[in-house]
Image (tube, rainbow, N blue to C red):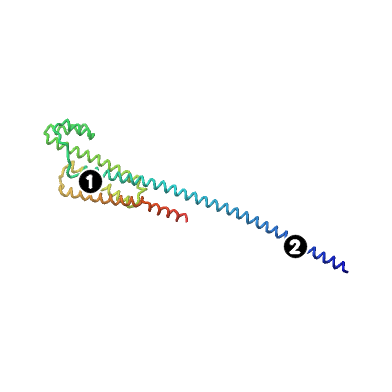
Amino acid sequence: MINSIKDFSVYVLSTIVSSGILLFIIRNWFKGNINSHFNKKLESHKHDLQKITEDIKYDYQRKIHDFSLYSNKKHEVYAELYKLLNEANIKIKIATARYREYPDFRQFEKVEKYLKEYQVSDDTIEHVRSKWIIGRNEGVKEFQRVVDMEKVIKADESRNKAYLYLINNELFLNDEVAVNAHDIADKLRLLVISENYKVLDGFEGTNRKDFYDEQKEHNITIDEKLKIVKVSMQKELAIGYYQEENNSITNIEE
């Protein structure tokens, strides 16, 4: 009887131990499978996250690079446009000035040499010569008219150069600069047109005072708008402007 109880106890104990071992094995097997599954998922997630991070980093670097190119081009365009507008303004001011000085030539040979330096055509020089032959006063008037016209033509070439540069690079201008630059070019054009009429026809049909008052108003407007353009360009190219742009890029990324 005692042996039976002992055998039963051994059986129960061995069964419990075996069940514990089996349960331990099963638990570890499930735990291993679950860990393996989550590890694979985690690695996959880390890989996807790394790829997304690299894509964002590349896109950010590309935007920084593009912005750097754009900013450099803007610097170049603003400097060149302001220079061209100023050059055109100065040349047209000189060409349309109310009071002008002319060389006092007594001999036509000097007149001819002067006109050739201005690259005046031979036909025009011969026309001035014909006036000079009629009388020196007539020759001097024609000489001055030709010089005035040549100065206006050359000054208008500088205006046209500035205008073409403006319209070809308007993409890089802010609205304030673009609008005022166009206004400047338009006022310069009006000065040239008025001067052309005056050189060709004198003050026929036009009051002299009204003519010069109008020219003066155009020049005042041009100078005012050049100041606006200068301040706007300086403000946009300042350090604070780049800080604002960098903040804008950061906000886009967020």
Q: Secondary structure at mark 1?
A: helix
* Mark 2 residue crowding within 10 angstroms, few (<14) / some (14–19) / many (20+): few
> In the rendered view, does 29 fall on the left or right side of 152?
right
Q: Which mark is residue 191?
A: 1
Q: Are marks 1 and 2 in contact (CB under 8 Å)?
A: no
Q: Nearer the viewer, mark 1 or mark 2?
A: 2
**Residue most extreme to the top:** 109
Total count of labels: 2
The amino acid at mark 1 is Leu
Q: Residue at x 29, y 51 (%)?
A: 180
Q: Secondary structure at mark 2?
A: helix
> In the rendered view, does 192 fall on the left or right side of 204?
right
Q: Upstream in the sequence, badge 1 or badge 2?
A: 2
Query: What's the distance in space between the residues labelled 1 and 2, CA to CA?
Result: 106 Å
> In the rendered view, does 47 fall on the left or right side of 67?
right
Q: Residue at x 35, y 49 (%)?
A: 173
Q: Position of residue 126 (x, y in %)?
A: 18, 31
Q: Position of residue 235 (x, y in %)?
A: 34, 52
Q: Which mark is residue 127?
A: none
Q: Position of residue 110 (x, y in %)?
A: 17, 32
**Residue most extreme to the right:** 1
Q: In this orientation, which residue lies closer to the viewer: 39 or 217?
A: 39
* Mark 1 residue crowding within 10 angstroms, few (<14) / some (14–19) / many (20+): many
Q: In this orientation, which residue lies closer to the viewer: 127 or 62?
A: 62
> In the rendered view, does 9 fall on the left or right side of 238?
right
Q: Position of residue 254 (x, y in %)?
A: 47, 56
The amino acid at mark 2 is Gly
Q: Is residue 157 above or below residue 20?
A: above
Residue located beneath label 2 in the image: 20
Q: Quadrant of the N terminus?
A: bottom right
Q: Is residue 43 above or below residue 110?
A: below
